[in-house]
Image (tube, rainbow, N blue to C red):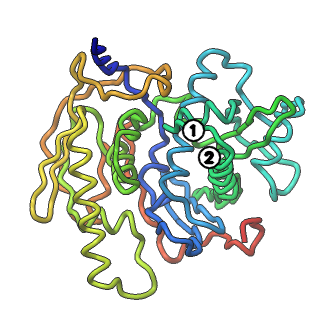
Amino acid sequence: MSRRPVAPIATAPRVVRLAQPFGLCQLFRPLAKDSKPRPVLNEQVEYAGVSLRFSAREALGAPEQTLLLALLEIAQDQHRRRPAEHMLNEADRSEVGAQLWSGLHVGTAAPLVDAPSTLKLHCSWSELHRRCGGKSVGGQVTESRRQSLMRLCEVTVWERVESTRKVRSCRLVSWLLGDDQRVHVALNHRLAAALLAPSYAQVLLSERLCLPSQTAMLVHAFLSTCLGVGKTMAIGHETLVARLWPPGSGLTPASTQRRRLSDVRAALRAIGRLQRWRVDLGATVATVTRTLSKPGVDSVVPQESLAPTSELRLTAEPHARDITRAGHFVVSDASFGEQPFWKKLNAHKYLQRNDEGSTTS
């Protein structure tokens, strides 16, 4: 007697609140699968009167972005249940809290002055694996996740307030393994702000884990930051390539450019197959809509990956925004918080380099 197949469970989307700058800048990029050394991370951006530079010895890829989104999801869940327990500031005298705070501000001149409060979280390696979509919890998987977490910890975020020209730095995250064998993590205050304030983009981790490639995941995170639910925009394939692969010192070979364009088109097709997206591919331009959700048609994800999430906020659908050129990335309604896109810093604006006080050289 044959068994009736069990139907997959349609679940609520796993909504992660992401600070818009971290979704719009080139902090994460596609990386070669071979053993070549990763390029150096040195990304400069400007947002709301603050100039920021992300610096590290190694660039970050899609696995690091997935891990960061999973950490944000955990932090959001834990803070919602016990807000006071997961706040972190310089007054925290607990052993774990003090070490996490120190790790966030390593290399900063003491004493810290008006350093913003942030959030801390804790989890097991197995929970972190499940949140990232993994099914195995073996030693090799744990080591790979540990390496990704260490790369996130090595990123220094330099901040310069343009009105006062004050400069300070803070790590993207800090972490330690406690005596309880749990992973303890502290977030950069700008990441934490998106979990505590109304201005944020919504990235659905449940959608991301259904995508077939790292390029598709990176495009999905970028488009999720650009578009609120129910909104539409047009974007050129070449524009997406330029965002994913920062230009190097030399010319890109024609064969490489063709492969990248092919990868971007495949990524857009994969996103278009998701329940909450519609993508119309043209020869050089894609029209992308983040559609209104319908009951019972959410993306299907493994039961082990479920996590409590907040409800999506719906917005009216405007006409399509044409941003087929890089210069069109400055718009007034970037995402749910209605914040402007980040702009590249002008060449004359100065921030410290890795060898000027940074520990990421």
Q: Are marks 2 and 1 in contact (CB under 8 Å)?
A: yes
Question: Which residue in the protein does label 2 denote?
Answer: 141
Q: Earlier in the sequence, mark 2 or mark 1?
A: 1
Q: Can you give x and y, in whole percent of width and height, for residue 44 in the image? A: 52, 65
Q: Is residue 146 left or right of residue 105?
A: left
Q: Residue at x 24, y 17 (%)?
A: 296
At label 2, counting other C-alpha atoms closer than 10 Å, the crowd grade (few under 14, some 14-19, many 20 or more) is some
SS at mark 1? Answer: loop
Q: Amino acid at mark 2?
A: Val
SS at mark 2? Answer: helix
Residue found at the far front of this picture: 1
Q: Residue at x 12, y 49 (%)?
A: 280
Question: Which mark is on residue 136?
Answer: 1
Give the position of the C terminus as an image quadrant: bottom right
Q: Nearer the viewer, residue 47 or 279?
A: 279
Q: Report which quarter residue 116 is drawn in.
A: top right
Q: Can you give x and y, in whole percent of width and height, for residue 254 in the image? A: 27, 83
Residue found at the far bottom of this picture: 250
How many numbered callouts?
2
Q: Residue at x 24, y 75 (%)?
A: 258
